[in-house]
Image (cartoon, coloured by chain):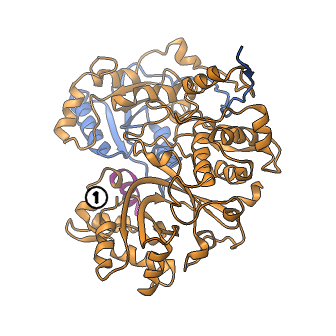
Amino acid sequence: MALETAGVPTISVHAPIFDGVARSVARANGMPTLRQAFVPQTIMGRSPAELRAFLERNDPVSNRPLMQEVIGGLTGALTEEDLKGVSFERATPRLLEPDTEEHLRELFIKNRWTDYLPIVLPTEERVAQMLTGTSHPPDEVVGRLRPTSGREYWEFTVEKVAVNAVMAGARPEYLAVILALAASGMSARSSSTTSFATLSVVNGPIRREIGMNTAIGALGPYNHANATIGRAYGLLSQNLQGGSVPGDTYMGSLGNWYAYSATFPENEERSPWEPFHVQHGFKSDDSTVSTFLGGWYTQAGFGTRDTWAQRLIHLLTACEPYLAPLLVLDPLAARGFVERGFDTKKKLIEWCAENARLTAREYWDNPWTQTLIRPLALTGVEPYATHLKAGADELVRMFRQQDINVVVAGGETTSAWKLIGASYRGNTVSIDAWR
Amino acid sequence: MHQRLTVHDPRGYPPKVTGKRLAARKETLEGKLIYLVDCLFDNSDVFMAQMQQWLTENHPSVHTQIVQPSSLREFTPSKSWADDPEMLARIRADGDGAILGVGL
């Protein structure tokens, strides 16, 4: 669209499944007649001959020859609609029309404002009560979110965050955490075809103040704060960014159960290591929440027995190479690693980065290393550029140290640990700023 | 008679959308320079190479160049590779059109 406004005619070519979203994005950017063409099927994994054959076939949306569509999209006279585009304003009222509880519940479901689990209706009284959980005024702008690049940002206030917190069943004392998540700029309902969710880790005194569960079942449905803060993050993301609707504002092929609720606190008290937020420049008595995009794969294991190294290497090399793991360790497992000489998180991360290796052939034979990492390799960004030059059977490191993270959680019933694919991009937000 | 409730609208505030016109099109692509933008999704480079070959065979007087984003140093979920400012500047400088693909 930047090229069109600069006077360069364009046509974008998509897989047919993107028909709805491509047209929706064009309209939201004021150019509903932006030229689009569609290949018969997705191009991933197709041979050159198959792709050539696609060019000889019809565009499955217009049912006209594909290359005729492409050339036609760059030539010819413009229509009145092409010249004008479309302008419109969408208002969001503060309150909905009064109705019965039954009808309002139906309305929220019909409008896709829920995660299809029962919600608490955000009455004026409940929202006012929720707002007692922060000193910030209801009309203060918290931030902007959007489901994906190319979409327009939607803005939201403290009150709008509180509305979604009520819907999730959260309590006012959790609101500062939920506001910090909303202010993170990271959506928990990203539209990537990868089906990524967003995990969040809470650190600092707030964990105890609001009764979060750091111990037995910390990652499960066993604590009101853990569960409802994570759920509120998902609901606020979808409602404040303009939706998360399959085929339009959500394109994750499989979807992701982590998207229901994936917030947990670090068990700082039982961890032998520095807390995550302190690793990233905060003081131990600061309260923060950190967001991790992913939640795609999960590997798991127990203990640090004699063959721990081989088993950890097996799991690391089974990870997706474009998405480094967040290691979540029970305190027993963490102390087991300490006994093996890993007296800091950094040492464990260094070991993982050093030992997680794949052949270059396997590393690059992945749609997402091709899409997300190969472009960086081509422009000389290391270590990817060196990986690209490696021989097919040469072993290359899967992850940079700075992309691997470690958090301690759990209740010491067994020496359990997980590797969850999750990308951290320095996104740790102060909760104290939202009290 | 069921009690009627007043509840908040849970949605955020969308921006105002301002209509934008499309760029003027040429009558024909013959003799013109068309950039084929490889958006870097898996296999897009192969697809664009095939498209270039097709155009060379079927419209030999159309000049084509395949371009890729080249100045972005890190992947950011909120940005598309196609936002690369250096690549866009190059296309704006002398392009008579651009075919972008494959993906959003």
Placement of A80 over or under A245, stated as above or below: above
In front: A303, or A364? A303
Q: In the image, what residue occupies the spot 68% across and 70% down? A: A282
- Where is residue A9 drawn, in percent x and y? 46, 28
Quarter the C terminus of chain A occupies: bottom right
Quadrant position of residue A340 = bottom left
Q: Position of residue A425 (x, y in %)?
A: 54, 60
| Residue A426 included in the magenta stretch of the image | no
Q: Amino acid at mark 1?
A: Trp
Residue in the picture at 43% in, 26% down: A20
Determine which quarter of the picture holds residue A19. top left
Colour given to chain B in the rendered image:
blue
Give the residues drawn in magenta, as a range: A370-380
Q: Secondary structure at mark 1?
A: helix
Secondary structure mostly seen in magenta is helix
Instruction: Determine whether, in the image, residue A89 is placed left or right of residue A38.
Output: right
Label 1 marks a residue whose chain is: A
Q: Residue at x 54, y 14 (%)?
A: A81
Q: Colour of chain A?
A: orange
Q: Nearer the viewer, residue A200 or A165?
A: A165
* Nearer to me, A203 or A371: A203
Q: Is residue A223 visible?
A: yes
Q: Which residue is mark 1?
A: A364
Residue located 30% across and 39% down the image: B48
Above or below A316: residue A273: below
